[in-house]
Image (spheres, rainbow, N blue to C red):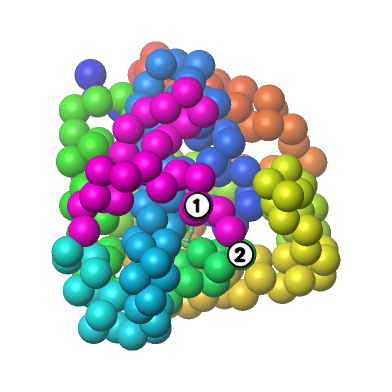
Amino acid sequence: MRFVVAIDGTSASGKSTTARNVAQRLGWFFLDTGAMYRAVAYEVLRRGVDPNDFERVAEVAKEIDIDVKPGPDGQITYVNGEDVSAYLRTPEVDKAVTPVSQNPEVRKKLVAIQRMVGKNRELVCEGRDMTTVVFPDAELKIYMDADINVRAERRKKDLEKKGIHMPLEEIKKDLMRRDLADSNRDISPLKKADDAILLDTTNLTIEDEVNFVLERIKKRLKK
Ligand code: DC
């Protein structure tokens, strides 16, 4: 059976954790597409390429293999067969991923991989263009958002778990910068699809979010 749950939304709205948990509960495939864009950005930085250098970033994207596999804690992301998952959530990659994800060659390559992964299987995926571009025919579409202050607090806690300490105001500014860039870019901008269900997570726990999505899946399966 094919059943695609496509989740889009703003940075740190809870997409990844919710999608991963829903997939785990159901034994479905979890696809974190932000990690794929981050993996390209990481490789761009590792090669000393300027993330804003359009041509060279496109070349890097063409040259490398990106692959994803399920792991014990979610997705394992590979660049040329090497597991780079541990290096993808740093402030450096956070910055580089914005121009890298605006590169049409990068998007073309990753969208093709994402559609292949989603062929004929049960899958929960999250990103910015899952409901609008990659899986416009998804069985269930969700758009997640939350108050900016709540999102900044969540991101701060995530970073602190990794030993990265940043002032809340700086994190907030970075989230706003990324929301603005994601929503206003020419190619595949972040926007709520008309048929996506809005899930405001400001006052919700992860458990609430997971249950909300599971309920919607159940309803959709009954139809
Ligand atoms: O969800 P995230 O923070 O890991 O995403 C990292 C960046 O990648 C984000 O700034 C926007 C971009 N992205 C995208 O353009 N399209 C996707 N499907 C997923 C992420």
Q: Is mark 1 within 8 Å of ligand 1?
A: no
Is 221 positioned to the left or the right of 199 in the image? left
Is 203 positioned to the left or the right of 33 in the image? right
Residue 171, x across and y down, in percent: 73, 65
What residue is rendered at 58% in x and 48% in y? 144
What residue is rendered at 30% in x and 51% in y? 79
In the picture, the quarter occupied by the C terminus is top left
Q: Residues within 10 Å of mark 1 (few under 14, many from 20)?
A: few
Q: CA distance from mark 1 to mark 2?
A: 10 Å
Q: 125 and 39: which one is in front? A: 39
What residue is rendered at 39% in x and 82% in y? 50
Q: Amino acid at mark 1?
A: Tyr
Q: Is residue 165 magenta?
A: no
What residue is rendered at 32% in x and 32% in y? 69
Q: Is residue 72 magenta?
A: yes
Which residue is label 1 attached to? 87
- Indicate whether 68 appears above or below 221: below
User: Is residue 97 among what the camera can see?
Assistant: yes
- Indicate whether 46 appears above or below 211: below
- Indicate whether 95 appears above or below 66: below
Residues in magenta? 64-90
Q: Nearer the viewer, mark 1 or mark 2?
A: 1
